[in-house]
Image: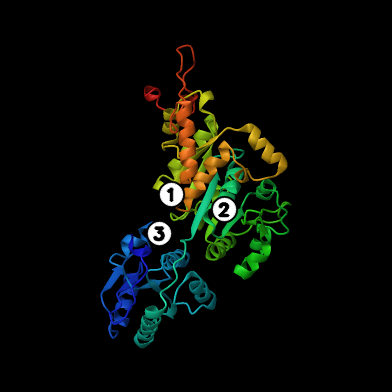
Amino acid sequence: MSALSQPPDAFGPSLLSIGLMSPDAMRRKAFTEALSSAVVGTIREIANYPSDLDELPRLLEPRCDVVLVDLDGNPERALEIVESIFSFGSATVIACSAEANLDLAVRCMRAGAREFLTFPLNPSTLADALARIAIRGASTPPPRRTARKLFVFMGAKGGCGTTTLAANFAVALAQESGQTTLLLDLGVPLGDVAINLGIAADFSTFNALENYNRLDASFLSTLLARHSSGLNVLAAPTEFPPTQPPVEAIERLLAVARSTFDYVVVDAGARLELKDTRFFYESAMLYLVTEVGVSDLRNANRMIGQFFATRGAKLQIVVNRFAPQSLLVDEKQIEKALTRTIDWRIPDDYACARRTAISATALAMEDSPISRVIRRMARKACGLPEEEPVKQASRLLKWARRGFSPRGTIKRVQTESESPSPFMDAGLLDPDHAGS
């Protein structure tokens, strides 16, 4: 079990171990000087905000009782870190800033910080805060909560099914996890999430973004529509908005959403202009949706190479409308074109997709080849086994009776009379290695 997943021991008579997190060496020095008169245990410096929140358990080994987090290096990122530490429930957080800002202090408390202090730190004030933590920590350890996560769906181009997948993934995630889940539709100029799910929304992202200066959890809750699955939805506008919101409005919307819900799913469409916002921080899981077409794979290839090459496991490749029996090339060529392995293959089930589109019902609410894959995605995203054991055993038995492997793929062998791979013409494959 990782350090962050273990419930803290009672502090009792033992000395508190302290972690100091700040990218600013002078701030870390200020932390150390303020602690000089306090009776504490070991003190460790953490010189950077982790780019991947999954690294937090390693950074806090051996376990820290208290972590002092400097907010000013990157306030939004620091708040995510505060929230993640609190979510796992092993350390108490003291948030620190040079800004005596009430809004920031409230956001820190909602994220899970126990104390909010301002620079320059007063040693006696810090000592009092540590004393309160020691007393309260001995009797009431911080609650353990599911770590909040952000999932962003982006299409290699329009029309590849990004909205359908994002909406149904969000429905499945809400059902499978049992956690509070919000779906944000950032489609422009008009989005289709509400139509896909068959819900009527009285308000939209436009109402949130035009009033972003007063946007908080309470205001956001008044704008949401509720799906029968338990999913909360902030739909896109149903009419063309008169203006485009500033980036800071979109950033504010996401910050409030993430501090309010356990899981936030974003349908980003093909909006590459958002790539430098916190929607694409390395802690977010990005699902890049594409189809097996020359233009789709070319776009995906360029997006991965120019913008997402360093995301590692935080980038998942989703091939939609996947029909292996009708491919003109095999999967190896597709993966060479993408420069990544395919993580998820959404079956091409036109009849099912058309039926649910006409009836405006969620694919994830029925049993179909498409919904099974989407539910596997959702279960993996929230840390559950991809399939429930009973269903998995039943499916394996069915596969065995039919005489094939669940991981088997149908490969099509190109005949000599057929033309070379179309990916060569698009510059996605090296002709000398196209067949390897």
Of residues 32 and 27, which is closer to you in this image?
32
Query: Residue 431 at x, y = what percent?
Result: 40, 23
Q: Amino acid at mark 1?
A: Lys
Res. 344 in view: no
Question: How far, Cα to Cα, is label 1 from label 3?
Answer: 11 Å
222, above or below 277, in the image? below
For label 2, the crowd category at 10 Å Cα-Cα, with few meaning under 14, some 14 to 19 and many 20 or more, is: many
Image quadrant in which the N terminus is located = bottom left
User: In what element is the residue under mark 3?
Assistant: helix
Of residues 73 and 105, which is closer to you in this image?
105
Question: How far, Cα to Cα, is label 2 from label 3?
Answer: 25 Å
Q: Amino acid at mark 3?
A: Leu
Q: Are marks 2 and 3 in contact (CB under 8 Å)?
A: no
Image quadrant in which the C terminus is located = top left
For label 1, the crowd category at 10 Å Cα-Cα, with few meaning under 14, some 14 to 19 and many 20 or more, is: some
> Which residue is the site of mark 3?
53
For label 3, the crowd category at 10 Å Cα-Cα, with few meaning under 14, some 14 to 19 and many 20 or more, is: some
Q: Which mark is residue 175?
A: 2
Question: How far, Cα to Cα, is label 1 from label 2?
Answer: 23 Å
Query: Residue 38 at x, y = what percent?
Result: 30, 84
Query: Of circles 1 and 2, which is in front?
Result: 2
132, above or below 24, in the image? below
156, above or below 38, in the image? above
Instruction: Kindly identify the residue that appears in the image at 50 percent across and 43 percent down.
Output: 288
Of residues 127 and 97, which is closer to you in this image?
127
> Which residue is the site of mark 1?
314
Q: Amino acid at mark 2?
A: Gln
Mark nearer the N terminus (1 vs 3): 3
User: In what element is the residue under mark 1?
Assistant: helix
